[in-house]
Image (tube, grey):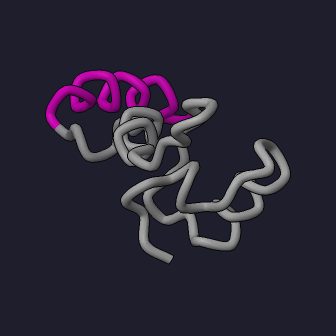
Amino acid sequence: MGNGAKAAQKRTRNGDKNPAKQAKSQAKVNEAARSIVCATCKQSFLVTTRAPALEQHAQSRHEKTMAQCFPGVDK
């Protein structure tokens, strides 16, 4: 016979001891990284968003420049 039941019991017993193997969620981290906000529509963008994407948003959505929609963001 196999030892499947014993292995399952051991995993449940040791589950609390090893928090590194538990699932981690990126949702909170991603939400915190959304610090670039459009002044017109209040849409948030990740910190890693580059200037061409922000400029495209400003031109296509609002027909404005990047400086008008995203004050304080450098190119």
Rendered location of residue 46, percent (x, y): 50, 52
Answer whether residue 12 is visible to the viewer in this image.
yes
Q: Nearer the viewer, residue 20 or 9?
A: 20
Q: Quadrant of residue 47?
A: bottom left
Decide whether the magenta segment is chiefly helix, strand or loop: helix
Rendered location of residue 75, percent (x, y): 50, 77
Q: Is residue 12 magenta?
A: yes
Q: Nearer the viewer, residue 2 or 35?
A: 35
Q: Nearer the viewer, residue 37 or 66?
A: 66
Q: Which residues are magenta?
A: 1-17
Q: Nearer the viewer, residue 30 or 64?
A: 64
70 displayed left or right of 12? right
12 displayed left or right of 48? left
Q: Is residue 75 above or below residue 27?
A: below
For the point 30% across and 30% down, the residue is 10
Rendered location of residue 33, percent (x, y): 39, 48
For the point 71% across and 53% down, the residue is 64
Q: Quadrant of residue 34?
A: top left
Most extreme residue toward the left is 17
Quadrant that contains the N terminus:
top right
For the point 55% across and 42% down, the residue is 38
Most extreme residue toward the bottom is 75
Rendered location of residue 4, percent (x, y): 51, 31
Q: Quadrant of residue 26?
A: top left
